[in-house]
Image: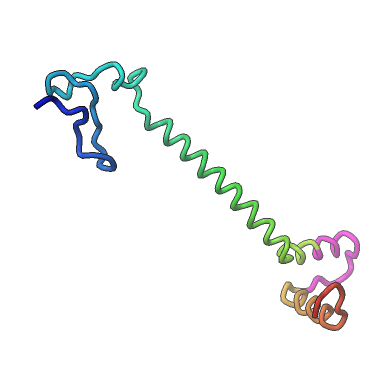
Amino acid sequence: MGCPDRIGAGPGTGRRTYQGHDGGNPSTLTAAAQPNDGRSPRPAVIRRLRLAASACATRGRAFVSWFNAVLGGQDYQRYVDHLQRNHPGCEIPSEREYWRRRHADADSNPQNRCC
């Protein structure tokens, strides 16, 4: 019986497979099975994973920011900035009071709504 082409426990076990070994000695590798410059391929994989995770995080933050803008998450802060800039003597309402007034105004003056 000849020497098998692959030695190892199979995929997903973390064991390396050796191709073209000499006489059953897994320590002798052919040039095709050796790394290019002696470095492990893991740093390149880790770099790619970090870049992919960074891109996902950036897209996630952009989506949250967009969704927050659609729901009006920054409206109170914009209103406070407007009052401080254009009406310095006016009292600044609490955020709770701002939303209470805003919803009451929207209910009493329905504009651009379906109901």
Residue 54 in magenta stretch = no
Q: How many numbered dots are placed on residues in this image?
A: 0
Residue 2 horizontal/vertical position (percent):
12, 25
Relative placement, left or right, of 74 versus 106 is left
How far from the left and from the top, in percent, is residue 63? Answer: 64, 55
Q: Is residue 66 above or below residue 41?
A: below
Q: Is residue 84 magenta?
A: yes
Residue sitting at 89 percent across and 68 percent down?
89
Q: Is residue 54 above or below residue 92?
A: above
Q: Quadrant of residue 7?
A: top left
Indicate the quadrant where residue 26 lies.
top left
- State the residue at coordinates (79%, 73%): 93
* Quarter of the rendering containing residue 39: top left
Identify the residue at the far front of this view: 1
* Type of colouring: rainbow
Q: Is residue 108 left or right of residue 34?
A: right
Give the vertical position of 91 relative to 115 (above or below).
above
Image side of residue 32 versus residue 62, left or right: left
Q: Identify which residue, 41 or 85, lies in the foreground.
A: 41
42 vs 64: above or below: above
Name the spot of residue 71 as percent of width and height, x first. 71, 66
- Residue found at x 68% / y 61%: 68
Camera-side residue of 53 and 99: 53
Instruction: Give the camera-side residue of 94 and 89.
Output: 94
Percent x, y for residue 74? 73, 62
Quick one: quadrant of the C terminus?
bottom right
Image quarter hosting the N terminus = top left
Residue 3 falls left or right of residue 49: left
- Report the magenta residues as a range: 79-93
